[in-house]
């Protein structure tokens, strides 16, 4: 999944980026409200982690503009403002979750997973395709009950494919879901990850549609 962090505190922004990348997400980080607004207009994100006290444009203004455009991605506010009226304003303004700093990173990961799950309309937390089961919360993949070891990138890639069984995902869609801005993929990195996934899961599970993209056949 592709996340946007809007946070002007360099240390926190850096820490959050590293932490959420370890969770297998593609993460972009912007340091002011205007940059957040611009990035969100691309429509490329699955979730926004939003600080309220941002330079150039307040977090609440970013949120209002986002919802004003009809964009429904989940928004998690992460702020030092702990007053009840701020929480109410944030949630009424269209945020899905409101966390007060300092936050436990493990809890943050769990909230992010819950919001992404809800947004994807998956009542069940696990993704299943035949005997292949992916558990986003536990970051586990099993095949016929046997655990499969995957790298963070392989896991992220598989998660995107399994969320859209039977649908062809383009190279660009897969790369966008797996890589952040700062680590641009080299030209054949995606093929390398797909190759490794096939080796671990079975060649037939991921089909190549030459020049179009990749798909995992549905059941
Ligand atoms: Ca701030």
Image (cartoon, rainbow, N blue to C red):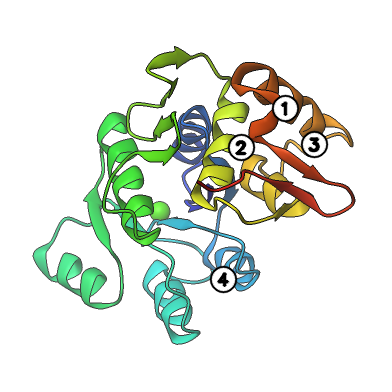
Which circle's residue, 3 or 2, is located before the other in the chain? Answer: 2
**Alpha carbons under labels 4 and 1: distance apart:** 32 Å
- The residue sitting at 47% across, 51% down in the picture is 7
Write down the residue under mark 3.
185
- The residue sitting at 43% across, 14% down in the picture is 147
Q: Residues within 10 Å of mark 4 (few under 14, many from 20)?
A: some
State the image coordinates of residue 171 (x, y, percent, origin top left): 78, 49
Query: From the viewer's perspective, is the residue at label 4 or at label 1 nearer?
Result: 1
Residue 206: quarter of image: top right
**Alpha carbons under labels 1 and 3: distance apart:** 11 Å
Residue 167: quarter of image: bottom right
Write down the residue under mark 2.
157
Which circle's residue, 4 or 3, is located before the other in the chain? Answer: 4
Q: Secondary structure at mark 3?
A: loop
**Alpha carbons under labels 4 and 3: distance apart:** 25 Å
**Alpha carbons under labels 4 and 2: distance apart:** 27 Å
Which circle's residue, 4 or 1, is located before the other in the chain? Answer: 4
**Alpha carbons under labels 1 and 2: distance apart:** 8 Å
């Amino acid at each position: 999944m592709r996340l946007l962090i809007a946070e002007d505190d360099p240390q926190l922004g850096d820490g959050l980026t590293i932490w959420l990348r370890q969770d297998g997400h593609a993460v972009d980080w912007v340091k002011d409200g205007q940059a957040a607004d611009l990035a969100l207009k691309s429509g490329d994100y699955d979730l926004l982690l939003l600080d309220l006290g941002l330079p150039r444009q307040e977090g609440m203004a970013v949120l209002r503009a986002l919802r004003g455009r009809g964009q429904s991605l989940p928004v998690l506010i992460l702020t030092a403002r702990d007053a009840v009226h701020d929480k109410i304003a944030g949630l009424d303004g269209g945020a899905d979750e409101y966390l007060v700093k300092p936050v436990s990173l493990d809890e943050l990961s769990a909230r992010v997973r819950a919001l992404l799950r809800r947004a994807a309309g998956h009542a069940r937390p696990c993704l299943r395709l035949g005997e292949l089961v992916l558990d986003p919360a536990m970051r586990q993949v099993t095949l016929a009950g046997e655990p499969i070891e995957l790298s963070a990138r392989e896991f992220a890639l598989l998660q995107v494919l399994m969320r859209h069984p039977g649908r062809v995902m383009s190279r660009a869609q897969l790369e966008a879901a797996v890589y952040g801005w700062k680590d641009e993929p080299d030209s054949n990195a995606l093929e390398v990850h797909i190759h490794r996934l096939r080796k671990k899961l079975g060649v037939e599970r991921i089909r190549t549609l030459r020049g179009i993209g990749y798909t995992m056949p549905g059941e």
